[in-house]
Amino acid sequence: MNVKTLANIGLSKELALIYSALIEKGPMSARKISIETVINRSLVYKILSQLEDLGLTSALEHNEKIAKFTAQSPNNLEKLVKRKKEQVSVAEHALEKA
């Protein structure tokens, strides 16, 4: 998935890079994500948490010591955009009242 498109949707550069890498490469460990995206591994964990809060990634169930993360369906981007639209609508309504 194109990083520029993801940024236009409202994801930060780092969120877009990691989500795009997971879509293109499939499930990866944080270390591998760090290598693929050239983002510090400790920051990768923080970004993965943010992506999970947005419904765009999740940790895989596993019996290994190393966690792997996967991208959720790009259809969840549509849900994200709808939530943002609703937030803008609420903000506009609040402004009109003020």
Image: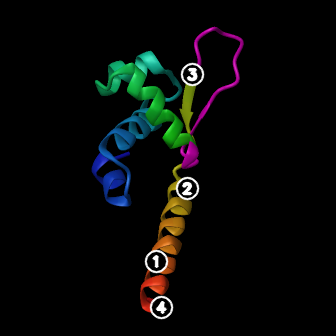
Examine the rendered structure and indicate whether residue 90 appears above or below residue 53: below
Q: Main secondary structure of the magenta part?
A: loop
Q: Quadrant of residue 43?
A: top left
Residue drawn where x is 43% and y is 91% of the image? 96
Residue depicted at x 48% and y 91%:
97
Q: Position of residue 6 (x, y in %)?
A: 36, 52
Which is nearer the N-term, disc 2 or disc 3?
3
Circle 1 residues within 10 Å: few <14, some 14–19, many ≥20: few
Q: Residue 48 or 74: which is nearer the viewer? A: 48
29 versus 3 height, above or below:
above
Q: CA distance from mark 3 to mark 4?
A: 47 Å
Q: Amino acid at mark 4?
A: Lys
Q: CA distance from mark 2 to mark 1?
A: 25 Å
Instruction: Return the residue at label 2.
Output: 75
- How would you rate the neighbour count of disc 3 (Cα within 10 Å): few for under 14, some for 14-19, many for 20 or more? some
Which amino acid lies under the numbered mark 3 shown in the image of this protein?
A: Lys
Q: Position of residue 69 (x, y in %)?
A: 55, 28
Mark 4 surroundings: few (<14), some (14-19) or many (≥20) residues within 10 A: few
Residue at the image point whose x is 33% and y is 22% from the top = 40
Real-space Cα distance between discs 2 and 4? Answer: 34 Å
Query: From the viewer's perspective, is residue 63 above or below residue 60?
Result: above
Task: Locate the C terminus by quadrant.
Answer: bottom left
Magenta-drawn segment? 53-67
- SS for dot 4: helix
| Residue type indicated by callout 2 | Asn
Of marks 2 and 4, the one in the foreground: 4
CA–CA distance in space, label 1 to label 3: 38 Å
**In-image side of 82 versus 33 (left or right):** right
Q: Are marks 2 and 3 in contact (CB under 8 Å)?
A: no
Q: What is the crowding at mark 2: few (fewer than 14 residues within 10 Å), some, or many (at least 20)?
A: few
Of the two numbered discs 3 and 4 in the rendering, the one whose residue sits closer to the viewer: 4
- The image's mark for residue 68 is 3
